[in-house]
Image (spheres, rainbow, N blue to C red):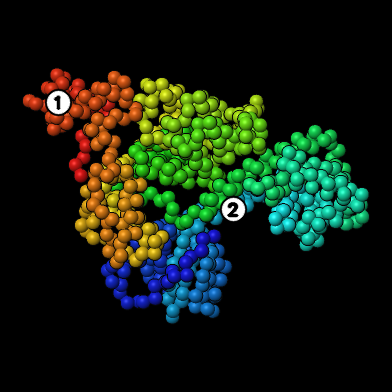
C-alpha cells in the first residue's frame, strides 16, 4: 500500500490559521481532520469532507467521528494505540460515510490532550485491485492443483528455485523441507535417473534450440517412487548466457496419459499462466499509480456536462467514441469510464494505435503463435485477451490500418478473433472504448476508414471540450499542476500572481490541458522563490492551433482534393474581408454566394473564426 512521506506533519497549532495557510490546508489533496476523544468533529478540510460524504462541517453531529468505523474493534484499537504512544501511523480501517457507503481509509494521527489531529487517504480502489490480484493468483494455483500440473522457476544466476504448491504436493514435501536450490531438486531424483536429468538440463542450457523434456522417477519421503514428466524452456541474455529456466512437472502414475496429451495439458496450463501473469502485470501497474493520478479537474459547465454523459454510459457495455482535440484528456476520460463501470476490478488495457508499427499492430492487438512470421520465436498473448472481462482503450483509432478494421469489426459484433498464425477462434468479453482527434466522417469519405466500423464505434459518442471552452477551470488546473510539479521538483511555490493567472486565462491554449501542464512545469522549474514565474511570454506563434494554421493555407489532412481547395479559397477570402460575412465587401459578396450558404459551407468544412489571444 502507499507509504506517506516522513515530512507529512499533522497540524498541531490550535491558533487561528493565517488566510494563506488555512487555504492551503483546506484545499490539500489528502483529508485533514481534528476530533476530540468524545468523537466531536472539530475540523475537516474539503478533501476529507468529500471522503466522508459531507457537504460541509455543519452537517456533522456531536460524536460523529465515533460512527466512522464500520468495525467497533478498529475504533477500540485505534484509540488504545493512540493513547499509549500519542501517535499512530499507517492505520487501516474500513469506515462508513454519511451516505452509508463503505470506504477504506489509511490514517496517520497524533494525540495532544484530548484532541486528535490527523490525515487520511481513501485507499478503497487500491484495496479492490489488490484483492483482485490475490484472486487471480489463487485461480492459477487452483488450476495447477486440478490438473496435477506443478510449475517451477529456476533463477540460474542466483541459484534460487521456486516451486508452486502443486510441485510440493507431487514431491510429498512441505516448503520448509526443501532447500529451494537445483542441488536439492537433484537429491529428490531416483539415483538411477539423476544422470539422465542432469544431461537433459545441460543440453538445454547449452543450446537454445533444445527444449528441456524428460521423464524420470522421484523419491517420496515415505520411500515410495513416483514417475513424473518434466518440460521446460530456458531464457538467454544478450550474450547467449542462460539466466532463467521455467517449466512444469506432471505425475505420470496419477494420470496415465500419452506424451501428446501431456504436452497438450502443458500448453493449456501454460496459456492460462501467461494470461494470468499478464493480467497481474497490468494490475500491479494500476496499484503502483500514485493517489490522485488521472483526476478530472474542473467545475465548468462544459466539463460537468461531459462527466455527466460519461457517467450515463459507464455502467453499460456499449462502445464509446471519445473525440476532441489533442491534449484534452481523452485517455483520462477512458480511465474514468472504466473506474465507474462494473469492470473496475478487471484489467484496463491502453493501446496507442498511432504508436505501434503497422507490421506489428495485428500481433499486438490479437496475439500470435510461435512461428507465425519470421522472428516470432514464442507465442504472444494479444491486448484483447489481456482485457478479457475488463476494458480495452484503443487510442487514436483513426490510425488503425484499413485491413485490420474488418477484424476489429468482427470482435465488436461476435466477440471473436484469431491469433496471427492460428486457425482457431478465441472468444473474448472486453468493453471497447476508442478515441480520435480526427474527423472520422471525412476519413470515411476519403476511403481510409470503414463506415460500418464507425457506426459500431460511435454508439455513444462523447466530445471532450477544448480548454478554451472551459476557461473557468484554468485556475483550478493551474493550482493543481503547480502543487504537483512543486512536489516533483522540490520547490516551495505558495503564490500565483494575479497577472500571471490572467495571462494564463487569456491565452488560447491550442495544445489544451497538456500544453497548460507543460507551461506550468517549465514555470515551476525556473521559479526561484515562492511566487510562480512563467518561463516566458505566452505566444500564439510558438504553438499554433489548427485554426491558425488553416488561415495560413496549410490544409488539414482530412480535407484534400476539391474540399481542400474550396476550404483554402474560403479561408483566404474571409481573411481578406476581415472575417466579415455579410454586407458590402463581405466574404459572401466576394464569393458571389448567399450568406446562409456560405455559413453552411463553413460549418461543413469546419471553418471557424480564430480567437484573438
The first of marks 1 and 2 along the sequence is: 2
Q: Write down the quadrant of residue 490 in the picture.
A: bottom left
| Secondary structure category for the residue under label 2 | helix
Q: In this rendering, would 180 be left or right of 390?
A: right
Rendered residue at 66%/37% (across/down): 378
Q: Position of residue 521 (x, y in %)?
A: 35, 55
Q: Residues within 10 Å of mark 2 (few under 14, many from 20)?
A: few
Q: Position of residue 195 (x, y in %)?
A: 87, 49
Report which residue position mark 2 lands on. 131
Rendered residue at 13%/29% (across/down): 577
Rendered residue at 87%/43% (across/down): 253
Q: Position of residue 435 (x, y in %)?
A: 42, 36
Name the residue furthest bottom.
113
**How many numbered discs sit on the rendered protein?**
2
Rendered residue at 43%/69% (across/down): 8
Does residue 72 show up? no
Q: Is residue 61 above or below residue 428?
A: below
| Secondary structure category for the residue under label 1 | helix
Report which residue position mark 1 lands on. 587
Q: Nearer the viewer, residue 476 or 192?
A: 192
Q: Nearer the viewer, residue 446 or 473?
A: 446
Q: Is residue 142 above or below residue 449?
A: below
> What's the CA distance linking mark 1 and mark 2?
64 Å
Q: Nearer the viewer, residue 238 or 7?
A: 238
Amino acid at each position: 500500500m502507499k507509504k506517506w512521506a516522513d515530512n507529512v506533519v499533522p497540524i498541531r497549532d490550535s491558533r487561528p490559521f493565517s488566510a494563506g495557510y488555512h487555504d492551503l490546508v483546506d484545499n490539500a489533496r489528502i483529508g485533514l481532520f481534528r476530533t476530540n476523544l468524545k468523537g466531536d468533529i472539530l475540523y475537516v478540510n474539503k478533501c476529507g469532507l468529500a471522503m466522508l460524504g459531507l457537504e460541509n462541517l455543519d452537517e456533522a453531529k456531536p460524536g460523529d467521528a465515533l460512527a466512522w468505523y464500520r468495525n467497533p474493534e478498529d475504533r477500540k484499537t485505534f484509540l488504545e494505540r493512540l493513547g499509549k504512544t500519542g501517535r499512530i501511523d499507517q492505520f487501516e480501517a474500513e469506515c462508513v460515510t454519511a451516505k452509508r457507503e463503505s470506504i477504506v481509509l489509511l490514517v496517520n494521527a497524533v494525540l495532544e490532550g484530548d484532541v486528535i489531529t490527523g490525515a487520511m487517504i481513501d485507499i478503497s480502489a487500491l484495496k479492490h485491485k489488490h484483492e483482485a490480484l490475490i484472486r487471480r493468483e489463487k485461480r492459477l494455483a487452483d488450476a495447477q492443483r486440478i490438473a496435477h500440473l506443478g510449475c517451477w522457476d529456476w533463477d540460474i544466476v542466483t541459484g534460487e528455485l521456486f516451486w508452486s504448491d502443486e510441485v510440493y504436493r507431487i514431491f510429498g514435501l512441505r516448503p520448509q523441507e526443501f532447500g529451494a536450490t537445483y542441488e536439492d531438486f537433484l537429491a529428490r531424483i531416483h539415483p538411477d535417473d539423476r544422470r539422465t536429468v542432469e544431461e537433459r538440463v545441460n543440453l538445454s542450457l547449452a543450446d537454445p534450440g533444445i527444449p528441456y523434456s524428460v521423464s524420470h522417477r522421484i523419491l517420496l519421503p515415505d520411500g515410495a517412487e513416483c514417475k513424473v514428466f518434466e518440460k521446460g524452456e530456458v531464457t538467454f541474455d544478450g550474450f547467449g548466457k542462460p539466466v532463467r529456466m521455467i517449466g512444469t512437472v506432471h505425475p505420470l502414475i496419477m494420470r496415465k496419459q500419452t506424451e501428446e496429451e501431456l504436452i497438450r495439458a502443458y500448453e493449456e496450463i501454460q496459456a492460462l499462466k501467461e494470461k494470468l501473469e499478464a493480467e497481474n502485470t497490468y494490475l500491479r501497474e494500476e496499484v503502483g499509480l500514485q493517489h490522485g493520478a488521472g483526476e478530472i479537474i474542473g467545475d465548468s459547465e462544459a466539463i460537468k456536462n461531459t462527466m455527466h454523459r460519461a457517467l450515463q454510459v459507464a455502467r453499460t457495455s456499449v462502445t464509446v467514441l471519445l473525440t476532441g482535440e489533442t491534449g484534452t484528456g481523452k485517455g483520462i476520460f477512458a480511465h474514468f469510464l472504466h473506474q465507474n463501470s462494473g469492470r473496475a476490478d478487471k484489467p484496463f488495457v491502453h493501446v496507442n494505435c498511432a504508436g505501434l508499427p503497422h507490421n506489428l499492430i495485428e500481433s499486438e492487438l490479437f496475439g500470435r503463435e510461435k512461428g507465425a512470421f519470421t522472428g516470432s520465436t514464442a507465442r504472444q498473448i494479444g491486448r484483447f485477451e489481456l482485457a478479457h472481462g475488463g476494458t480495452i482503450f484503443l487510442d487514436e483509432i483513426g490510425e488503425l490500418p484499413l485491413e485490420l478494421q474488418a477484424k476489429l469489426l468482427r470482435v465488436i459484433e461476435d466477440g471473436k478473433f484469431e491469433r496471427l498464425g492460428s486457425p482457431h477462434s478465441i472468444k473474448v468479453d472486453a468493453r471497447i472504448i476508442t478515441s480520435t482527434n480526427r474527423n472520422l466522417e471525412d476519413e470515411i469519405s476519403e476511403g481510409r476508414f470503414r463506415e460500418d466500423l464507425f457506426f459500431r464505434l460511435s454508439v455513444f459518442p462523447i466530445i471532450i471540450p477544448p480548454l478554451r471552452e472551459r476557461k473557468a477551470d484554468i485556475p483550478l488546473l493551474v493550482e493543481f499542476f503547480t502543487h504537483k510539479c512543486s512536489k516533483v521538483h522540490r520547490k516551495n511555490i505558495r503564490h500565483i500572481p494575479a497577472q500571471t493567472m490572467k495571462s494564463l486565462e487569456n491565452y488560447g491554449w491550442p495544445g489544451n490541458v497538456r500544453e497548460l501542464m507543460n507551461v506550468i512545469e517549465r514555470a515551476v522549474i525556473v521559479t526561484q522563490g515562492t511566487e510562480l514565474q512563467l518561463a516566458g511570454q505566452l505566444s500564439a506563434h510558438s504553438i499554433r492551433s489548427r485554426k491558425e494554421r488553416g488561415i495560413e493555407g496549410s490544409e488539414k489532412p482530412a480535407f484534400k482534393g476539391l474540399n481542400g481547395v474550396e476550404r483554402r479559397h474560403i479561408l483566404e477570402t474571409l481573411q481578406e474581408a476581415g472575417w466579415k460575412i455579410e454586407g458590402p465587401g463581405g466574404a459572401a459578396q466576394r464569393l458571389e454566394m448567399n450568406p446562409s450558404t456560405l455559413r453552411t459551407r463553413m460549418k461543413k468544412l469546419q471553418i471557424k473564426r480564430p480567437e484573438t489571444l
